[in-house]
Amino acid sequence: MPTIFHRYNALLKKYPFRSNMITTSILFGFGDITAQSLFKHKKTVIITDEKTGETHEEIETSDYNFARTCRAMIYGMMFFAPISVLWHGKTLPKLKNPFINILQRRKMEQNEHSYKKLHFYDSVFRMSVDQLIFPALVWIPLYNTVMVLLAQHEDPFGVIYNKLENNWFNVLKANWTVWPGFQLVNLYFVPVHLRIVTANIWATGWNCFLRFVHNTAGHGKGSGHKIEELVDIEDDDQEITMIYD
């Protein structure tokens, strides 16, 4: 009797775009709700006493932002999932390591042990191409553009330019702390049709970790922990970075 997983697995193979669009939207929404609920956004505000004119700092904790979750779900469904299917599902698996010539490749394909080595070499090459091109040139600019436009900021293109100018490289460095290793495992062990779902599940934990680092006392910038300082990429008015794989 087919299980829910078997049915879902079959849907991913038969309808890769529709299935991944729905799944990605749900997982992006769940990831944002989880992050907002567990690690509430904290912002330092200056309070002025009207009578004395004295000022002091207070920490404000934001309420749950439903609109932000909707923006994350729209981005996941309409932009991230279709591009991921085209790139991770249809283009990346066709790339082969160019440093292995045709004769050597054919010879390695005939032996089970050598074939595993060949698959590993191809996976390393695919991961390298993916991480050198897509986060920097596609995911980071696309995410900032879409989320700013959906949030209906005044002068949206000015906001997008400022975000990319101030945070592009910091976000890229943060991405490289965690995604290359995961993607190598994903490309080597996970079947092609399940890779996007696997990345989305991983991204939920990544998203929560980013919020934990930014909004938990003793962590993030100034904590003395190199990785935490590196991945603390959120500004007070900036939405959390969802996923750059």
Image (tube, rainbow, N blue to C red):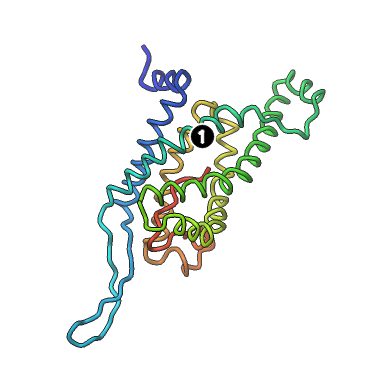
Q: Total label count?
A: 1
Q: Nearer the viewer, residue 209 or 126?
A: 126
Mark 1, secondary structure of its residue: helix
Horizontal side of residue 164 vs 99, given as left or right? left
Horizontal side of residue 202 vs 73, given as left or right? right
Horizontal side of residue 30 vs 94, given as left or right? left
User: Which percent across, then down, holds residue 83?
Assistant: 51, 35
Q: Tell me which residue sits at (45%, 26%) in the image.
A: 17
User: Which percent across, then down, holds residue 204?
Assistant: 41, 43
Q: Find residue 24 and report its image quarter.
A: top left
Q: Amino acid at mark 1?
A: Ser
User: Which percent across, then down, holds residue 14?
Assistant: 46, 18
Q: Find residue 42 and report its image quarter.
A: bottom left
Q: Residues within 10 Å of mark 1 (few under 14, many from 20)?
A: many
Horizontal side of residue 54 vs 200, given as left or right? left
User: Which quadrant is home to the N terminus?
Assistant: top left
Q: Nearer the viewer, residue 226 or 13?
A: 13
User: Residue furthest toward the front?
Assistant: 155
User: Residue furthest toward the bottom?
Assistant: 52
> In the picture shown, does residue 154 fall above or below 138?
below
> In the picture shown, does residue 137 fall above or below 230?
above
- Residue tagged 1: 84
User: Which percent across, then down, holds residue 62?
Assistant: 28, 59
Q: Tell me which residue sits at (38%, 38%) in the image.
A: 27
